[in-house]
Image (cartoon, rainbow, N blue to C red):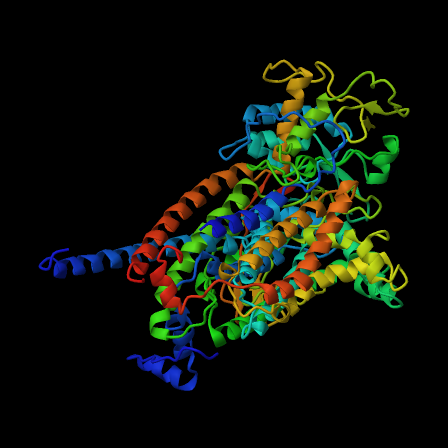
Amino acid sequence: MKMKKTLTAIALGFGILAGAGNAQAAGSGPKPPTVDWSFNGIFGTYDRAALQRGFQVFRNVCAACHSLDLVAFRNLEAIGYSEDEVKAIASSYEVQDGPDDSGEMFNRPATPADHWPSPFPNAKAAAAANGGAAPPDLSLITKARGAGGDSALRVSLFHPGGFPLGADYVHALLTGYKENPPEGFDLPAGKYYNEYFPGHAISMAPPLGEGIVEYEDGTAATPEQMSTDVTTFLAWAAEPELEHRKNLGIKVILFLLVLTAMLYALKRKIWSDVH
Amino acid sequence: MSGGTSNFQSNSRVVNWIEHRLPVFSFLDSQLHQYPTPKNLNYFWNFGSLAGIVLVIMIVSGITLAMSYTPHTDLAFDSVERIMRDVNSGWLIRYIHMNGASIFFIVVYIHIFRGLYYGSYKAPREILWMIGIFILLAMMATAFMGYVLPWGQMSFWGATVITNLFSAIPLVGDWIVQLLWGGFVVGNPTLNRFFSLHYLLPFVIVGLVFLHLWALHMHHSNNPTGVEIKDEKKDTIPFHPYYTIKDMYGLGLMLIFFAFFIFFAPNYFGHPDNYIMADPLVTPPHIVPEWYFLPFYAILRAFTSDYWVYQIVSLGGWLMSAKLAGVIAMFASILVLLLLPWLDRSRVRSAKYRPLYRFFFWVFAIDCVILGWVGGLPPEGVLVTIGQWSTFWYFFHIIIIVPVVGILERPKPLPDSIAASVTSAPQAAE
Amino acid sequence: MSETASGSAEIDEQTRRDFLIWSTVAVGAVGTALAVWPFIDQMNPAADTLALASTEVDISQIEVGQSITVIWRGKPVFIRHRTPEEIKEAEAVDLADLPDPQTDDARVQKPEWLIMVGVCTHLGCIPLGQKSGDPKGDFGGWFCPCHGSHYDTSGRIRKGPAPNNLPVPGYEFTSDSTVLIG
C-alpha cells in the first residue's frame, strides 16, 4: 500500500508537476499580479460586456499597429454582435482581393468571411514603421505569454508558488509602465520602461491613456478598466472555444465519474469470489 | 502465441466455418478469455493495457488531425489554428492528441518503473523487456517529430537543437545533419519528412506492441511476488472477466485524469512559445523540450568539458569532445536499460523481498525526478552541479549498484507460491 | 446466510450482477458512441468553409447570348443571358418528353437569366456549352463529354445517362446588375 502510493505520487507527480511552461520565457521581471478573470476556473465564461468593450479598445487603439490574423469578422458574432452588426463592422474595413480579369489587385469592403486586416502589408513594413520592432500579432497573445494558457492547475515543479497566466501578464504589461525608470537603469532612446516586460525596455509606448476611448456602454475608460477589458477580448481571440470546452468538460467528467463508479461496483462484484 | 490452451467450442455454423479455416476464435479465447493470469496482480499491472489504449487514442486522433493539417512551413501553423477554430470539434481532437502524448508517457513511465520494481525484466522475460525499450525509443522519436509539426517557435528550435546532436558524430556528423534536414537548416523538406515519419512510426509501434504481447504470453505476466506460476488452478484466474473488468475500471480512472487536462488545463504540459509561429531568425531565450524528455536533456547538458565523469571517460578530453560525450550519454541512458536483465544478478525478482535493492530503487526514482527538474531549468550555478551528480548516479545505479546489490544482498524468504502469498496476506494483493 | 434462504439469495445475487453488467455495458456503449461523433463530425465542412457559402456576382457585363462560369462553394455555376429564341424553345417543350419533368418557368426567376450548377448529374463532370465554340448537344444547350448527356436551353436533361436536370442553386437578384448565389 505504502509503496503503491509513493510510487504513484512520484511517477504521476513528476509528469504533472513538470508541465506548465517549463521555465518561463517572460521571466526576468516581477511576477504579474493574479487577476480574478471571469473566464478562470472550471466554470469560467467570458464577460460579454467586457468582451465588447475590449473589442472597442482593440479596434480603436491596438489595431493601429497590431494585426489579429486568426480572427475573422464572422467570429465577432460569438461576442454578442448580430449578423447585421458584423456585416456593418466588416464593411467599414477594406481588404485586398484579386486579381481581377485585367490582372490587377483591387480593394473591396470586407465581408464577414474575411479575416481582420493587418495594419501593415508585411512584417518588414511593420518593423520599419515601428523603429525596427514589428508589433506582434495579437491573435494568440494570451496563450503565447505567461505559462499554461488558460489553466485550472497553477502549480508545477518549476513554479511551486503558482504560475501567472498569459492574461495576467498581458494585463500587467499594459498597466506596468513607469514614467521614470529606477535609479541606474539605462533606458535606450525610443524605449519605454515597463516593470513586467522582460528586460524592461519596451518599444511600445504606453497605449492606454486616460479616456483614449469612450465606451459605448458608458463605463469610465480608466487605464485599469481598459486593460482588463482588452485582455478579456484578447483571451477570447486566443481561445474562442473556451466556454464550449469547459461546458463540455463538466459533462464529460460527470459522465466518466458515473461510468467509473459502475465499473468499480462491477469489479468488486466480479472479484468477490477470488481469494 | 503460446500459453493457455483453448477448449473453445461454438454452436454457430458461421463461427465454426471460419474457425476451421482461420482459428481466430480459439486464438482470442485462449489469449484474452481463458488466458491464465496471476491472481495477485495489483493496480500497477493496469498500466500496460492503459498504454495500449492510449496508443489507439493517439492513432485515431492523429489520423483525424492529419485530415486538416498542412505540412508546409508557410501554412502549418495556420492550419493547426484553423483546426482549433474552424474545424468541427477540431480543438477537442487537437487537445486530445496534444495531451495524449503526455498521458502516454506518464502511463509508460509508470509501466517501466513497475517493471523495475518487481524485476519483470528477468529471465525468461528479457526479450519482452527489450522490445519494451524499443517501443520507448520509437515513442520518443514519434513524439519529437510530432512536436515539430505545429511549427511554433519551440517546434522549430527543438528540431534545430535535437537534429544538431548528430553533428557531434566525428567525420560524418555534418553530412548526417544535412541528410536529416534536406537542406542547410530545418526547413520545409524537414517538416515534410517529419510529418511522413510521424505518421508511419505509430504503426511500427503497433507492430512492436504485438511482439511485446507475444513475448508476454509466452511466460505470462510477472506478479508482485515475482514467484512464477506453479499450479495454474490455484495461482491463476482467467483474464476475462477478472482482468478485463479491472482494466476497464483503471481506464475509467485514467480517462477522468486525461479529461481534466483536455478540458481544464489543455496547455499545461505545453510551452507558451509554441503559440508563436516559427521564426528562424529569433531564438527563444530558453529552449526546453517537452517534459518527458527533460531527464535525458539534463544528461545531455551535464557533459561540460570540466565534468569529472567526462574527463575520465574521454581520457582527459583526448578521446572525444564533451559535446559528443553528452550525446552518447543521452542515448546510452536508454540503451543501457537493454542490459539490465544481465546486470541484475539477483535470483529474486520482486523488490518486495529485496530491502536493499528497494532502497536503491527509490533513490534511483528520485534521481530521475531530479534530472527532470534540472532539465527544465536554465543550466546555471548550482543546477549544473546537481545535474552532473544526478547524471553520475543514474549510470552508477544501473551499472554498479544493481549488479553489486544483486550479489551481496540477502533477500527475505519468498512465499511458496502465488496462492500461498494471497492466503497468508489477503490485504497485500489488493 | 441461513440454509433455507441461500437458494433464492443466489438467484437474487445473479440477477443483480447481470443487471449491473448490462447497465454498465449500456452506459459505456452510449459514451463510446458519443465520443466517436467528434471524429466523424470533423470531416463535415468547417466554419470557414461554410462562411464562404455565398457568392455575389456582377452580371451587368454579360451580353445576350453569352455565358459566364463563376465558382460557388468550389463548384462551377453557369450564368447564361439567354436569347429570346432560347427562352421560346425552352418554354415550348412538352413536359412528357422530359426524363425529369420541370417547366422552364420553375427553373428561372427572370426568363433571360438561367443560373444553374454546371455539374452533370450523371457522375459529376462539367458539361460543355459555355463558350461559343463548344458543342452544345442535340438540344442547343449543354453537352457532357464524359458519357454523352444532352441538356437543353433550360439545362434540362434530354438524352443520355444523366438522371436529373442541372440543379438550380438558391439565388436572389440583389439589384438589376448583381445576383447573390447561395
The quarter of the picture where residue A251 lies is top left
Q: Tell how many labels.
A: 0
Q: Quadrant of the C terminus of chain A?
A: bottom left
Residue A114 can be seen, yes or no: yes
Q: Position of residue B310 (x, y in %)?
A: 82, 57
Q: Is residue A230 left or right of residue B304?
A: left
Q: Residue at x 77, y 56 (%)?
A: B162
Q: Position of residue B118 (x, y in %)?
A: 52, 62
Above or below, A30 against C2 in this view is above
Above or below, A64 against B90 in this view is above
Q: Is residue C2 left or right of residue B70?
A: left
In the image, B308 versus A210, the foreground residue is B308
Q: Residue at x 55, y 49 (%)?
A: A12
Residue B152 can be seen, yes or no: no
The quarter of the picture where residue B395 lies is bottom right
In the image, C114 versus A74, the foreground residue is A74
Q: Position of residue B295 (x, y in %)?
A: 68, 52
Q: Residue at x 63, y 38 (%)?
A: A149
Q: Is residue A131 left or right of residue C95?
A: right
